[in-house]
Structures are given as C-alpha cells and as structure tokens.
Image (cartoon, helix red, strand yellow):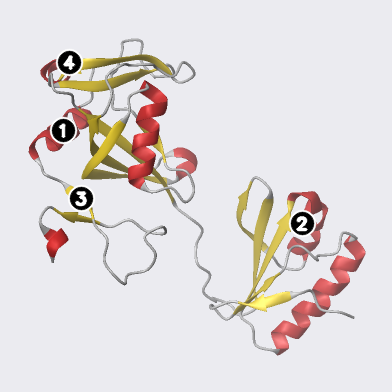
Amino acid sequence: MELLEANPNPFGGIVINPEPIPDDPKTFQAQLTHSLDTWCDENYKVVWLEIPIEKAALIPIATAAGFTFHHSMENYLLLIHRLVEGAFVPPFATHYTGAGGVVINEKNELLVVSERYRRRNNPSYKLPGGALHPGEHIAECVTREVMEETGVQTEFQALVCFRHWHGYRYNKSDIYFVCRLSPLSQDVVKQDEEIEECLWMPVQDYLDDEFVSVFNKHIVKAALESPGATPMEIQGYSDPEKHEIFMPAGMEHL
C-alpha cells in the first residue's frame, strides 16, 4: 500500500500534497489509514490535509479518520489531525485589513464619499477606502481604493493612525489604516456600484457635520496635525515587495 504523497513542515507535522490525492473514496480511505499509521510510528505530531473543492466527497472520510476543519477558501478546505494531543497548530488569519485616505486639496477641501448601502437614511460622509487585496501593500491599496471610488488620482504621503476593532465580519477582527494622500487630480467620478455621493467638502464643514462619526472626525484631525509615519526601506531586510515599513518622520536617515 502506497503512502499519500506528503512533505514535513516546520511544526513537526506533515503536509499531504493535494494534487495526487486519489479521486476514488475507497482508495483514498485505504491510503489515508495506512499513511496515518506510518506517520504515527515516525513521530509526526500533526497531519495537514488540503482537499480541493472538486474532491469534496473525500471530506467525510477525512473527518471519520479524526481530521477537523482548520479553514476554508473558495476552492479548498484545509483539515488537520493532531497525532499528538496538544500539538501546536498555527491559527488561520484572524483579521481583515483595510485603509482609508485623507485627501485634502489646496482649497482645504476634504474628499469624502457617502456609501450607497448604509445603515441610516441621512447622508453619512466618510473617507474613501477599502480592503487590501491579497499581497497588496497599504500604500497601493489606499491609492487604488480612492481612485476606484472617486476617480481622483493621489500620491501616498504618510500613515497617520490605525484602528483595531473586534467583532467585525464573520466575528473576525479588523485593522483599519488611515493614510494622508495628496491629490494629483481634482475631477470627481464616483463609483456607481457602492458610492451614492462623492464630493470635495470644506474640512470645517466635515468636522461640524452632525452625521459624521466622532471617529472619522478624529482621524481627519490627526491627518491635519500629525506628520505621521512615512514609508522606509531598511537595507538588507527581506524583500520590499513582501513588506512595508513605516517610520516617524526623520528616521529615514538613521
């Protein structure tokens, strides 16, 4: 009987290669049972099993063998089986990450949007912004989101502040980065799908608006009063395509 094709991971576990997993449930069950017995004898602590959606019929076989769900995406389910009680398993991602842009023009006007799908009837103006795409940097996200929602091209200046919030979508937590951007264009072209209204509003009018949340007023004030943290590359530290570093103004020369 052949073992399922697998490779060790850094946590004392073994990861089953999803591509050669047999389609036939009986063959899979036999190979899985034989593999688990072998890996127990070899002192592996955890088995990781990714089942593609096209092989979803194998999931009940895996759970019957002792596997539990770890996380899922659109096209696969990842399961784990602790061969040693209490073995460490890194948790799946627990947070959403988003960014909003404070964009103020030479007339001291703030670029704001009112979302089409909101909880109250009155216009509630907020900063343009949205969620980061996988592998996307914060600076890339916020300039992209501002462009998509308002049609205004911008340049990233600084990270001003951030908010950490629990109990967001699907009971995950959320980190929201507030960034100061400088406008490179002025004409507004709103995104019809999500945005009901988009305009340049005098900053003081925004701060005085009773329908603007206290949080949004505070972050605009922070963008006006704080120099914030600016992007910085540290020579010899990893690949800048894979990380972003923000430091207080003046640190870039250290």
Image depth: mark 3 or mark 2 in front: 3
Cα–Cα span, label 3 and label 1 = 20 Å
SS for callout 1: helix
Cα–Cα span, label 1 and label 4 = 13 Å
Residue for point 49% across, 18% down: 193
Which residue is more in the foreground, 15 or 169?
A: 15
Q: Amino acid at mark 4?
A: Asp
Task: Please report whichever mark, 4 or 2, sits nearer to the chain's N-terminal start.
Answer: 2
Cα–Cα span, label 4 and label 3 = 30 Å
Q: Is residue 102 above or below residue 86?
A: above
Cα–Cα span, label 1 and label 2 = 49 Å
x then y, percent, for residue 58: 81, 57
Q: Amino acid at mark 1?
A: His
Mark 2, residue position = 59
Residue for point 13% across, 66% down: 254
Task: Please report whichever mark, 3 or 2, sits nearer to the chain's N-terminal start.
Answer: 2
Q: Amino acid at mark 2?
A: Ile
SS for callout 4: loop
Q: Are marks 3 and 1 in contact (CB under 8 Å)?
A: no
Cα–Cα span, label 3 and label 2 = 47 Å
Q: Is residue 143 left or right of residue 17?
A: left
Cα–Cα span, label 4 and label 2 = 54 Å
Task: Please report whichever mark, 4 or 3, sits nearer to the chain's N-terminal start.
Answer: 4
Mark 3, residue position = 230
Task: Please report whichever mark, 1 or 4, sits nearer to the chain's N-terminal start.
Answer: 4
Label of residue 209 in the image:
4
SS for callout 3: strand
Q: Is residue 90 above or below residue 134?
A: below
Mark 1, residue position = 218
Q: Are marks 1 and 2 in contact (CB under 8 Å)?
A: no
